[in-house]
Amino acid sequence: MKKSFLAVLLMIGLVVPAFCETLEVVGKAGYGVNAKIDGSGGLTMDVDSPFVLGAEGYMYLLPSVGIGAGISNVFDSKVKNPAGVKIGMTNIYVSVKPKIGFIADVYLLGQFGYGLVRVSDVEKVDSGIYWGAGAGIELMSWIVEVVYSNNKMTVKPGPSDPAFDVTHSMVTLNVGYKFAI
């Protein structure tokens, strides 16, 4: 069953690009602002602004809608409340990019995937769902984006502490370059 599923995915991956109008790869760097952690029971902690690096690939089956996948790394940053704790994550996601601009190349951005979370000085952390939504503009292959993102996770601070659900959210300002194929 697994071999059949992988064979179908491989065929789709090899055949679909032949029907695409455009293929593009985007590399981007960003800076997270208003980063915070919200936990159960009204717990809220501010997080230092992290740097973000990412890459995405898109196929355009229609001229105005790109479907693709991406990966982004949110570098570790300090949580301001408990001293010494750092949080970072690597997000792997599928993305949709509908273009809405008439004069300039303005587009919306939707991302959904899984966030691999790293937290220092805790006993255990379970990674969870990642999602992001935003908008961007393309100017001569350069892109500028604003993306709100959200990572869900479960954290167990110590051996005798109970595990609790946590949400890390932030707004990222990205600048990047698009390579069209």
Image: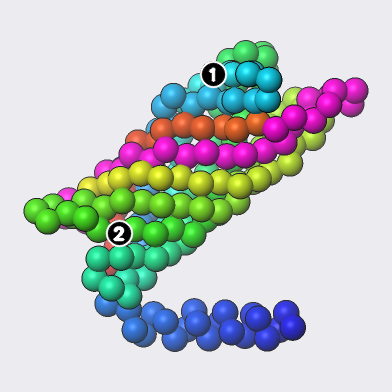
Camera sees residue 143: no
Quarter of the figure that contains the N terminus = bottom right
Rendering coords of residue 149 (x, y %) = 47, 39
Q: Report crowding for label 2: few under 14, some 14 to 19, many 20 or more residues within 10 A (C-alpha).
A: some
Which residue, given by chain and number where applicable, does mark 2 sit on?
98
Q: Report crowding for label 1: few under 14, some 14 to 19, many 20 or more residues within 10 A (C-alpha).
A: some
Single out the mark in the foreground, 2 or 1: 2
Tag 2: amino acid: Pro
Give the label on residue 140, or none.
Answer: none
Q: Say above or below: 47 vs 155.
A: above
Give the label on residue 46, or none.
Answer: 1
Rendering coords of residue 46 (x, y %) = 54, 18
Q: Quadrant of residue 58?
A: bottom left
Rendering coords of residue 124 (x, y %) = 79, 35
SS class, disc 2: strand
Residue lying farthest to the front in this orientation: 41
Rendering coords of residue 75 (x, y %) = 54, 36
Residue at (34, 58) in percent of width and height? 97
SS class, disc 1: strand
Q: Say above or below: 113 vs 3.
A: above
